[in-house]
Amino acid sequence: MLRAFFVHLSENKSLRNFAEQSSLGQRVSGRFVAGTEITDAVRATQATNRLGMSVSIDNLGENVTNLDEARHSAQLYHQILDAIAANKLNANISLKLTHMGLDVDENLARELVSGLVARAASMSPPGFVRVDMEGSPYTQRTLDFVHELHRMSGNSNSVGTVIQAYLRRSENDIEKLVSEGIRIRLCKGAYKEPAEIAFPAKSEVDANYMKLTKILLKSGIYHGLATHDENMIRQAETFARQEKISPDTFEFQMLYGIRRDLQQNLVKSGWRVRVYLPFGREWYQYFMRRLGERPANVFFIARQLLRA
């Protein structure tokens, strides 16, 4: 119920406009969003790197409405790649296709994202672009695009995507991606989807997450397991040890500002950790989905406001 409530709020345009423009909204979002400018993202990435963790930088935004917005979004990502190289950051980038104009002009979106992947591939050392997954209407289009990008000359180690364990189709999608050597971030899923295409019960999602985790860990490809669920993490650790899978052949991925204690404990135990670090002015939808995923986040924000 709580998750559905916050997903509903994330789609409220009036509330979004108010929150993103108000000083209160920006202050509240600061726990989960690393500021609004590239310089903010660089500082947060440097701090995270010093703690022994890598980063995936995401300029927040989705569903742009015109070509100029799409081009501006892509230009920001080029600047992020420049900042990663200039500051020698241990970081890659994550982007959404609708932020690159997929709903406005699919050919332009392909051109923009292809340019970013080519730029990342040309870096020294080579960079990496994670094409994020959005709601189910975009699943097949995203996967088709990633397969196409991955097949382009020079791109094979510089582009990957995300699979959501709550979708019933995900095992089949993983098999196709793995067969081509495409790197995957596995998450549970943060969108509201009908039971016909998504597992409705948490226990079913958890079971599928672990089933898919085992497939990924045994694939011989470098993947990311995105979860804050300690039970899922412990099961993955146990499976990796049993199968003699080296800790440097995959990574755990967690969100900026959430379970920082767990992030550090994993690093101290010898596991690789990457922090998904969002920044930008269009933070509202991302923020609301994070509140819906974990009720403890709501109580944390409330305590912070009471202390202010």
Image (cartoon, rainbow, N blue to C red):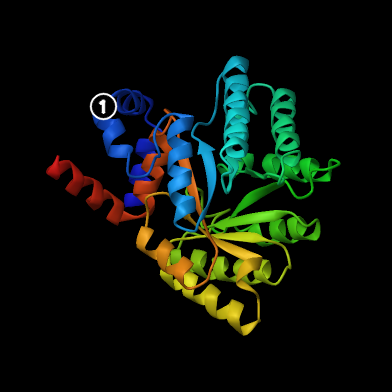
Residue corresponding to mark 1: 23
Which x, y percent locates residue 235? 51, 76
Residue drawn at 53 percent across, 41 percent down: 57
Nearest the viewer among 227 and 212 is: 227
Is residue 24 left or right of 185 when viewed as pictured? left
Which x, y percent locates residue 226? 52, 58
Nearest the viewer among 86 and 216 is: 86
Is residue 87 left or right of 177 when viewed as pictured? left
Callout 1 amino acid: Ser
Kindly indicate the quadrant of the structure image that contains residue 245: bottom right
Which x, y percent locates residue 267? 47, 66
Kindly indicate the quadrant of the structure image that contains residue 216: bottom right
Residue drawn at 62 percent across, 64 percent down: 250
Q: Report how many numbered discs are placed on residues in the image.
A: 1
Nearest the viewer among 157 and 87 is: 87
Is residue 245 left or right of 54 when viewed as pictured? right
The answer to whether residue 234 is above or below residue 147 is: below
The answer to whether residue 121 is above or below residue 221 is: above
Residue drawn at 65 percent across, 81 percent down: 244
Q: Secondary structure at mark 1?
A: helix
Residue drawn at 71 percent across, 23 percent down: 108
Which x, y percent locates residue 172? 71, 60
On the question of residue 272 being in view, the answer is: yes
